[in-house]
Amino acid sequence: MTGFATLFRKELVRFWKVAFQTILAPVVTALLYLLIFSHVLEENVRVYEGVRYTQFLVPGLVMMSVLQNAFANSSSSLIQSKVTGNIVFVLLAPLSHLEFFGAYVAGAMVRGLVVGSGVLAVTLPFVGVHFAHPLWIVAFALAGSAILGALGVVAGIWADKFDQLAAFQNFVIVPFTFLAGVFYSIHSLPPFWQAASHANPFFYMIDGFRYGFYGRSDIDPAASLAVVGVFLVALSALALALLRAGYKLRT
């Protein structure tokens, strides 16, 4: 496990060295979302009885930050190593594909969870947040950050340049996150778009995570966790298969 620990530490140091950009910036962005949307919609939108719109919004913003930053960490680390050529030093080390995958995903999870904790901390003074089921919060936070960390590994392996990775983030990650119920309940949508939302795996992560705060969700949290678990296994299997084959890594 020495190789895993070393690569994991390298991933932590990499994002911590630029914490102003990797941690503080997304926290400030999420706070701006809260201030703007709460100011505009607080008195006009009611999602759950007894839950103010700003209270409803906070778990969605926290989970959105966790997901986006977990993806950004593993994907950007891999593409930077590929573009600069230093990926060869990781590949030459006596690391198994499991250690390689685990270190990148674990590093992504740490960054996602740190940013999510920061978003939650800065929003607490503005909103009275409840913690109805803390174990559900932890379960979905860990599973969601692991999924996006694994997806970041897949995207980082697939992309050959920064433009391709940016396109993946702008046309896949951001739309799937924004359309997953961060700012609204899917029950407010027409039937067609409700059905479409159920095809979005990000929806299950955010809806289940929100259940942990208020004990209310659009679907059963156990069903959400099952979907998230299947998605995590499938993405991990794909990433491990690519690493084992050396796809776009060993040239």
Image (tube, helix red, strand yellow):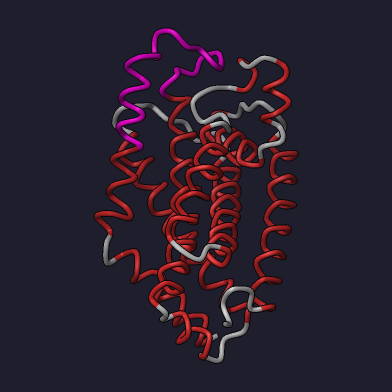
Is 229 left, or right, of 125 in this rendering? right
Q: Residue at x 47, y 31 (%)?
A: 130
Q: Residue at x 69, y 78 (%)?
A: 245
Q: Which residues are magenta?
A: 30-54
Reply yes or no: does residue 51 show up in magenta: yes
Depth check: 136 or 240 in front? 240
Is 136 left, or right, of 219 in this rendering? left
Is 195 left, or right, of 185 in this rendering? right
Which quadrant, please, contains the C terminus?
bottom right
Is 239 left, or right, of 166 in this rendering? right
- Total number of numbered discs in the rendering: 0
Where does residue 178 sit, x and y in percent of width and height?
A: 51, 33
Q: Residue at x 53, y 22 (%)?
A: 184
| Corner quadrant of residue 222 | top right
Where does residue 200 sit, x and y in percent of width and height?
A: 66, 37
Where does residue 214 sit, x and y in percent of width and height?
A: 55, 28
Where does residue 153 sit, x and y in percent of width and height?
A: 56, 64
Reply yes or no: does residue 143 show up in magenta: no
User: Looking at the image, is 232 positioned above or below residue 1?
Assistant: above
Q: Residue at x 56, y 17 (%)?
A: 48
Depth check: 87 or 232 in front? 87
Question: Which residue is outermost to the left?
Answer: 20
User: Looking at the image, is 43 positioned above or below residue 223?
Assistant: above
User: Looking at the image, is 66 positioned above or below residue 54?
Assistant: below
Depth check: 22 or 128 in front? 22
Which quadrant, please, contains the N terminus?
bottom right
Depth check: 51 or 37 in front? 37
